[in-house]
Amino acid sequence: MRDAAATSALAKPAATILDSTRLIAIDWGTTSARAYALDAAGEVLARRSATLGVQYVANGDFAGALATLTEGLSGAAPMLACGMIGSRQGWVEVPYEGCPARFEEIATGVVAVPGTRLSIVPGLLHRDDAGIADVMRGEETQIVGTVLDDAPQLVVLPGTHCKWALVRKRTIVAFSTFMTGELFAVLREHSILGRLMTAGDDAGALARGVAWSLRENAALTHDLFSARTLPLTGALAQSAAADYLSGLLLGAEIVAARRWIAQHAAADAAVTLVGDAALCERYAVALHLANLDARIGATTASARGLWQIALHAGLVHS
């Protein structure tokens, strides 16, 4: 595993990092993994990343993957990971904690990996009014690292499976998943809609798609076909079709999320976007068109959240 590709960013000399590190915080997902060396104040000293997500760890060699990812960072500090590493396909399956979940309570579900200095954060499970389950792994840690006070917040985490989470008094009350990113990829790559799409970047087409899905009586399964007919008839450039499709899906997600917000009486909650910077910007544009303004949270939310959970779990001390 040690020859696996990894990139690092060192803010200080390696020896200083090892001496100052109090926790190795790891965001370990499906496709990639990121490790952060944190000092006694929870600040990032250095970081490393590698394409060592759980689906790329050969023959279940998670120990080798961990050694590659943390080489030059680890020293003797404890390690705490979140994400799919705690899933059924990961190193050790960590049971979900139920919602509502206070930030401090998430730490009670942390599970140690036998024979290592690594512990893993549990994911969360929420059931809606019909009893249907929704789950997250990793996003709960980003939420903990984002919400710093008791004010109500809606934390939106764009990605393959976008999460909308309601937080009140540092408690994750409820959340809902929207498969917008995965649906976009499937439609673009494996449906007739992608055949007329060429590379391009068109903010106007994105806004047009969002607005069309936000209109009264929108019908997504019908409207999606316009991502083919508009470029077919010359009413939309082929280079703009992907952004238009993205806009249709984003608008439909926002319409459904608004209903979810209303069901939870959360109209007063501030909205914070957390995740990939470019994707958060797209969501910010779409939300603004729907009269929902949002701020973009810190890019180090996972590391900050892991530090807070490690404090509550007694792995580190302030």
Image (spheres, helix red, strand yellow):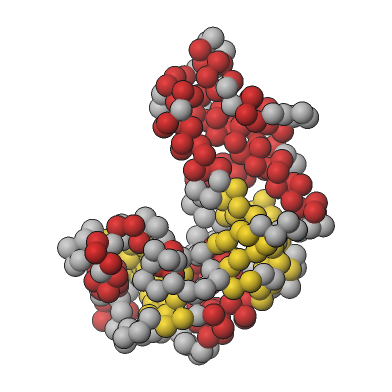
Quarter-of-image position of residue 269: bottom right
**Residue 3 % position (x, y):** 17, 63
Residue 37 visible in this rendered orientation of the protein: yes
Q: Number of marks in the image?
A: 0
The structure residue drawn at horizontal position 62% and vertical position 29%, both measured from the top left corner, is 221
Q: Is residue 142 left or right of residue 3?
A: right
Q: Is residue 217 left or right of residue 66?
A: right
**Residue 89 % position (x, y):** 39, 63
Q: Is residue 65 left or right of residue 27?
A: left
Measured along the vertical axis of the image, is residue 297 above or below residue 254? below
**Residue 218 % position (x, y):** 72, 29
**Residue 299 % position (x, y):** 50, 60
Measured along the vertical axis of the image, is residue 193 above or below residue 158? above
The structure residue drawn at horizontal position 42% and vertical position 21%, both measured from the top left corner, is 195
Quarter-of-image position of residue 119: bottom left
Judged from this view, the residue extending furthest toward the left is: 3
Q: Is residue 255 left or right of residue 80?
A: right
Measured along the vertical axis of the image, is residue 315 above or below residue 86? below
Residue 207 visible in this rendered orientation of the protein: no
Which quarter shows the N terminus?
A: bottom left
Measured along the vertical axis of the image, is residue 272 above or below residue 83? above
Judged from this view, the residue extending furthest toward the top is: 233
The structure residue drawn at horizontal position 52% and vertical position 39%, both measured from the top left corner, is 183
The structure residue drawn at horizontal position 71% and vertical position 67%, both measured from the top left corner, is 173
Comparing 314 with 38, the one in front is 314
